[in-house]
Image (cartoon, rainbow, N blue to C red):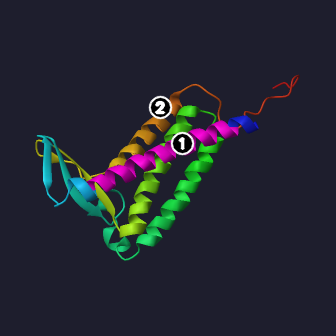
Amino acid sequence: MAYPRLIRRATLACGALAAALAVDLVTKWLILNVVMVPPRTIEIAPFFNLTLGFNTGVSFGMFREFFLDRPLMLAGIKMVIVAGLLLWAMRTPKPLETLGLGLIAGGAMGNIVDRISQGAVTDFLDFRIGGWHWPAFNMADTTITIGVALLIAGSFWPGRSVAPVLKRPSGAGH
C-alpha cells in the first residue's frame, strides 16, 4: 500500500467521522438545550415529529435491561468496533467504502459520547406512516445508515479487491 494512498484514505475516513460526529453532537445539543425546553412532541408533518427519548439499549432498545447498569461496557464494545471500522477503511481501495466506513464510525462515536456522558443515547427523530411507527432515532443513526448504504454500493462498484489476487506463474499448465 502506497503511503499517499493511506493518507488519502485516512483523510477521507477521519473527515467523514468528524463530520458525522459534529452533525450528531450539534443536533443533540440543540434538541436538549433549545428545541425541547420544555420536553414535548413537536409535529413537523403528519408523518414526522420531534420527540425526545433516551435509549439505554442497543439498536431499537434491544438488550436494554442488560446494559442499563453497564453503559461503559457497551461504550467500550462500540469503541473496539469503531477501531475495527477505521482499520477496514484504511485497507479498502474503494473511496466509496472508505467514506461509508467513516460515516458509520462517526455515527457510532456520536452515540458513544451520549452513552458515556449521560448513560443513554438521545433520540428525537420520530416517523410514523398510517399505523406504522418507526422507533425514534438520531442523526448518528442516520449517518450509520447512509454509511451502510455507501458500503453496500461500494461493494458493487468496480475496483480492486483488498485481498491480492494470486497469479499463475507464466508457463504453468493445467
Q: Is residue 1 visible?
A: no
Label 2 packing within 10 angstroms: few (<14), some (14-19), many (20+):
few
Whole-percent x and y of residue 21? 44, 50
Report the Cα–Cα distance between label 1 and label 2.
20 Å
Which dot marks residue 15? 1
Q: Amino acid at mark 2?
A: Ala
- Mark 2 or mark 1, which is nearer the start of the sequence? 1
Whole-percent x and y of residue 89? 59, 43
Q: Residue at x 88, y 22 (%)?
A: 171
Whole-percent x and y of residue 124? 25, 53
List the single residue furthest toward the bottom.
69
Front of the two marks 1 and 2 = 1
Q: Nearer the viewer, residue 34 or 125?
A: 34
In the displayed structure image, the side of residue 30 where residue 109 appears, left or right: right
Q: Amino acid at mark 1?
A: Gly
Q: Which residues are magenta?
A: 6-31
Whole-percent x and y of residue 143? 40, 44
Q: Nearer the viewer, residue 140 or 132?
A: 140
Please tell me whether residue 73 is drawn above or below residue 148 in the rendered image: below
Whether the magenta-drawn stretch holds residue 171 is answered as: no
Please tell me whether residue 105 is drawn above or below residue 68 in the rendered image: above
Q: Residue at x 50, y 47 (%)?
A: 18
List the single residue furthest toward the right.
171
Label 1 packing within 10 angstroms: few (<14), some (14-19), many (20+):
some
In the displayed structure image, the side of residue 151 where residue 10 appears, left or right: right
Label 1: which secondary element: helix
Q: Which residue is mark 2?
A: 153
In the displayed structure image, the side of residue 64 where residue 77 appears, left or right: right
Q: Residue at x 72, y 35 (%)?
A: 4
List the single residue furthest toward the front.
34
